[in-house]
């Protein structure tokens, strides 16, 4: 069993959310045994675009993606947990990246790659410009997502 957590983002304001989640999870005492055994890999990517497809080819049984999203439907800090198939058809979800998670997963599916093992945590964000700071709402949501992912891992680790 091998699980990947991929924090997606950029160095700008709320768009750092995926990185913050990955960083906090990588330092959690409760996950260290899994990390040391190579059963849990936690990485951060700077706007991966099509490089996301590379991560899908490493034989992970479960992939967890975390990124800031902008739907214009909710307030900053709103948390979405979706399966890969759900976000492919969700045109309302915008990424701050040139080629976001949704189009990359759609391409992966067209290419015959397995995306059924992917779960996406998205955090609604508003700020993603270089001169802006990460918002308090985003920092609070990051803490919630870290806890949600830790809880999720504790439930599925014996199932995978």
Image (cartoon, grey):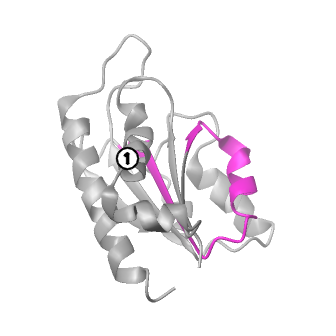
Query: Do we see residue 8 in this rendering?
Result: yes
Specify whether 113 is left or right of 76: right
Q: Residue at x 64, y 41 (%)?
A: 48
Instruction: In the displayed orientation, state which residue is furthest to the top.
Output: 131
SS at badge 1: helix
Q: Residue at x 43, y 80 (%)?
A: 157
The image quadrant that residue 44 belongs to is top right
**Is residue 28 shown above or below 131?**
below
Instruction: In the displayed orientation, state which residue is furthest to the right.
Output: 111
- Along the line of sight, the residue nearer the viewer: 64 or 70: 64
Q: Is residue 22 magenta?
A: no
According to the picture, the residue beneath numbered tag 1 turns out to be 21
Query: Whole-percent x and y of residue 133?
Result: 31, 19
Specify whether 133 is left or right of 102: left
Query: Whole-percent x and y of residue 32?
Result: 42, 60
**Is residue 32 shown above or below 3?**
above
Query: Whole-percent x and y of residue 151?
Result: 28, 70
Specify whether 54 is left or right of 146: right
What are the residue bounds of the magenta stretch?
44-71
- Along the line of sight, the residue nearer the viewer: 155 or 122: 155
- Along the line of sight, the residue nearer the viewer: 93 or 83: 83
Q: Residue at x 62, y 33 (%)?
A: 98
Q: Is residue 68 magenta?
A: yes
Specify whether 90 is left or right of 17: right
Q: Residue at x 26, y 37 (%)?
A: 138
Query: Whole-percent x and y of residue 129?
Result: 42, 18
**Is residue 8 shown above or below 11?**
below
Q: What is the quadrant of the N terminus in the image? A: bottom right
């Amino acid at each position: 069993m091998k699980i990947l957590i991929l924090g997606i983002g950029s160095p700008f304001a709320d768009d750092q959310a995926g990185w913050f989640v990955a960083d906090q999870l990588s330092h959690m005492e409760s996950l260290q045994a899994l990390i040391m055994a190579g059963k849990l890999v936690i990485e951060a990517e700077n706007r991966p675009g099509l490089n996301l497809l590379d991560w899908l080819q490493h034989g992970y049984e479960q992939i967890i993606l975390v990124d800031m999203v902008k739907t214009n439907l909710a307030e900053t800090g709103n948390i979405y947990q979706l399966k890969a198939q759900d976000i492919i058809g969700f045109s309302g979800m915008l990424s701050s990246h040139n080629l976001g998670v949704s189009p990359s997963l759609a391409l992966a599916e067209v290419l015959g790659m397995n995306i059924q093992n992917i779960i996406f945590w998205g955090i609604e964000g508003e700020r993603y410009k270089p001169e802006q700071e990460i918002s308090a709402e985003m920092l609070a949501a990051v803490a919630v997502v870290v806890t949600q992912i830790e809880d999720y891992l504790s439930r599925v680790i014996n199932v995978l």
